[in-house]
C-alpha cells in the first residue's frame, strides 16, 4: 500500500512540474509594447518618434508627419496667418482675412440638477462650439463647452481668442495696403451680425438702407464667411454623432468635439478627395455662380 501511495505522489508531482514548465513558456514581443504601461502612451510615442520609426507607425498606424498634422495647432506666426489670408484672397476674393468665425450648438443630455443652464434659444440643451475656419474648411481655432444659453458675442467676449487678439499673442500681421490700392487695412476675422465690430473682426453692414458699395461689401463678406458654415456641415455629415443628442457628461462631449475636429483637419489635409468629394461643399463655376 505504501509503494502504491508513493508512486501516485510521484505521478502527481510529475504532472505539476510539466504544468509549471508550460506556464513559464516565454513569448517574444517588441520592447516598446512592455513600456506602454510603465511610462504611458504619450511618453512612449515620443520615444518611438526618436528611436523606432517603424514601431511608431505600428503603434499609431500613421507616420510622424501625419501624426503632427493630426495635432496641428492654431497659427502663431505672421507667415502662417499670411498663408491663410492669401487663400481667402485667391479663393473667395476677400483680402486680409485670417479666418471666418461662427458658433455651433452641440446638443447634449443635460446633467442632473443643471436646471436651464444648458437650455438654448432653439428650445434644446446644448454646449457651444465656437470655431475659426480657414479658406480650405480647416479649423484653425476652436473653443467648446460654454453653456447653450450664451450668445455668440458672449462666448467670444470670454474666450481666450479675444484675449489673445487683445494682447497680440497671436502675432497677426500688421496693417498693410490692399492689393491694387493705396488703402491700408488690418488683417481681420470675419463673422456675422452676432459678433462685435472690432479692428480685428469685421461683420456685415446692417441690412437696411444700404448703398451700392455696402451691398457689394456684404456680398463679399458673406461669400467668404460661408466657409465656416460649410465646415460645420461637413463635420456633422461625416461625424453623425452631431446630428443627434449626445448622452454624455458635457466634459466628455467637449473631448468628443475636439477629437472630431482633429480628425476633420487630418482628413481634409491627407484624404481630401475621399472625405469631401467634388460637389460636397459650395463651389463656383467660371462665371462665379454657385
Image (cartoon, rainbow, N blue to C red):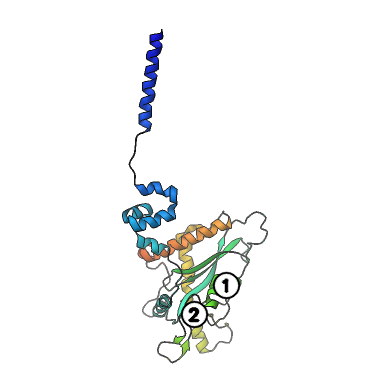
State the image coordinates of residue 289 (x, y, percent, origin top left): 41, 78
Task: Quarter of the image for the C terminus: give it.
Answer: bottom left
State the image coordinates of residue 137 (x, y, percent, origin top left): 43, 70
Q: Can the viewer see residue 136 in this picture?
A: yes
- Sequence-earlier tag: 2 or 1: 1
State the image coordinates of residue 60 (x, y, percent, origin top left): 38, 54
Task: Quarter of the image for the N terminus: give it.
Answer: top left
- Residue that sits furthest to the left in the current view: 54
Q: Can the viewer see residue 245 in this picture?
A: no
Q: Quadrant of residue 155?
A: bottom right
Mark 2, residue position: 188
Mark 1, residue position: 156
Classify mark 2: helix, strand or loop: strand
Along the horizontal axis of the image, is 14 left or right of 117?
left
Q: Quadrant of residue 124?
A: bottom right
Q: CA distance from mark 2 to mark 1?
A: 15 Å
Amino acid at each position: 500500500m505504501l509503494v502504491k501511495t508513493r508512486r501516485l505522489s510521484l505521478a502527481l508531482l510529475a504532472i505539476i512540474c510539466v504544468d509549471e514548465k508550460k506556464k513559464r513558456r516565454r513569448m517574444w514581443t517588441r520592447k516598446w509594447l512592455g513600456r506602454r504601461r510603465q511610462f504611458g502612451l504619450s511618453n512612449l510615442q515620443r520615444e518611438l518618434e526618436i528611436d523606432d520609426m517603424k514601431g511608431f507607425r505600428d503603434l499609431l498606424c500613421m507616420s510622424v508627419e501625419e501624426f503632427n498634422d493630426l495635432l496641428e495647432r492654431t497659427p502663431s506666426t505672421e507667415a502662417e496667418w499670411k498663408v491663410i489670408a492669401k487663400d481667402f484672397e485667391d479663393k473667395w476674393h476677400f483680402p486680409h482675412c485670417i479666418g471666418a468665425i461662427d458658433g455651433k450648438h452641440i446638443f447634449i443630455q443635460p446633467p442632473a440638477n443643471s436646471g436651464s443652464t444648458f437650455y438654448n434659444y432653439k428650445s434644446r440643451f446644448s454646449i457651444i462650439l465656437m470655431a475659426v475656419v480657414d479658406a480650405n474648411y480647416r479649423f484653425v481655432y476652436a473653443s467648446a463647452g460654454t453653456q447653450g444659453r450664451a450668445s455668440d458675442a458672449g462666448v467670444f467676449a470670454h474666450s481666450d481668442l479675444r484675449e489673445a487678439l487683445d494682447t497680440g499673442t497671436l502675432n497677426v500681421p500688421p496693417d498693410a495696403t490692399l492689393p491694387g490700392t493705396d488703402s491700408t487695412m488690418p488683417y481681420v476675422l470675419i463673422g456675422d451680425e452676432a459678433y462685435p465690430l472690432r479692428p480685428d473682426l469685421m461683420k456685415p453692414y446692417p441690412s437696411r438702407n444700404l448703398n451700392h458699395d455696402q451691398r457689394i461689401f456684404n456680398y463679399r463678406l458673406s461669400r467668404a464667411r460661408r466657409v465656416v458654415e460649410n465646415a460645420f456641415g461637413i463635420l456633422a455629415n461625416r461625424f453623425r454623432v452631431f446630428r443627434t443628442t449626445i448622452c454624455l457628461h458635457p466634459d466628455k462631449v467637449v473631448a468628443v468635439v475636439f477629437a472630431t475636429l482633429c480628425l476633420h483637419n487630418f482628413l481634409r489635409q491627407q484624404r481630401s478627395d475621399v472625405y469631401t468629394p467634388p460637389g460636397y461643399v459650395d463651389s463656383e463655376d467660371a462665371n462665379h455662380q454657385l
